Amino acid sequence: MLVPSQPSPNQTRLGNLTVTTLSDGFLDVPGAYFSNLSPQEHTRVLPTARFGANIWLIEAGARKVLVDAGSGSWLKERFADTGNLGWQLDDRAPERAAVTDIIVTHMHADHIGGLVAGGRSLFPNATIHVQASEWAFWTDVALPQSVPEDQRPLIELIQALGNPLKGQIKLHEGKADLGGGINLLPAAGHTPGHQVVHLSAGTRELMLIADAVVSEALQFGNPDIHYALDGDPAKAAETRKTLFDRIASDRIPFAATHLTSTGFGHLERSGSGYDYTAA
């Protein structure tokens, strides 16, 4: 089942919304992917940094809204413990058919790989919501030849994953209101059209901030730390600090894709950074 039959630490309710965290596994990323950090900070991610691989299901009445889809089988050669959701399995077809909307926070393969198998879309009934700038960047036919050769396989994979989804894509620019308290907010830096999800019911709020933060060991205490897969590291840091400030000021519970915790947490200011507490 997409959603556990009993309440769990991975599930929370917000008004008429039920939000469930689904784990696609984890990735061990080289510590060298982080820069502008102190020697002491560097020791926290040597030799690797453990990343979670979380996605979310939002249930709102008859709607079932996925936020990203994991990596499918596309990254298993390098990261053996990814793709655990197994969307491509035949016995999951009824669950896939029930998904009405998919929010793509950004088009890196660990977020969209679970949408495609065998050259076809696995979620044929879903409208897929993507920032226009994100779609335009990754689907540009000239992009593979404009990047260093070692980056081309990644670009070519993303383009191959995007192609079967074309007929389902609904583009938007900036903020987008999907109704029922589900709103999308631009959060560029990690990628050109990276976006986060803001959920609300009355005065209560939740946020799903995708890859605005990728390392709980480093980037809460020092939001300025750069990550190699950020397209614009300075912009990503600016976005991160803006989000952290809002989350801490308004006491908004939040979750992020690559945190090892699958629940929601809180931030409090601490010196020039923040302290993270898992809920």
Image (cartoon, helix red, strand yellow):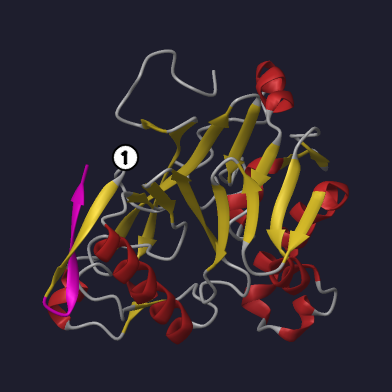
Q: Is residue 142 left or right of residue 255?
A: right
Q: What amino acid type should be assigned to the residue bearing mark 1?
A: Gly
Q: Quadrant of residue 33?
A: bottom left
Quadrant in which the N terminus is drawn: top right
Relative vertical location of residue 100 with respect to residue 178 in this rendering, above or below? above
Query: The magenta stretch spans which residues?
Result: 271-279
Kindly identify the residue that appears in the image at 74 percent across and 25 percent down: 97
Relative vertical location of residue 77 with respect to residue 83 in this rendering, above or below? below
| Front one among 189 and 64 | 64
Q: Is residue 121 left or right of residue 65?
A: right
Image coordinates of residue 66 in percent, x first then y, are 59, 39
Element assignment for label 1:
loop
Image coordinates of residue 206 in percent, x first then y, are 39, 48
Kindly identify the residue that appears in the image at 61 percent across and 37 percent down: 65
Q: Which residue is mark 1?
A: 263
| Front one among 213 and 26 | 213
Can see residue 47? no
| Magenta stretch encompasses residue 278 | yes
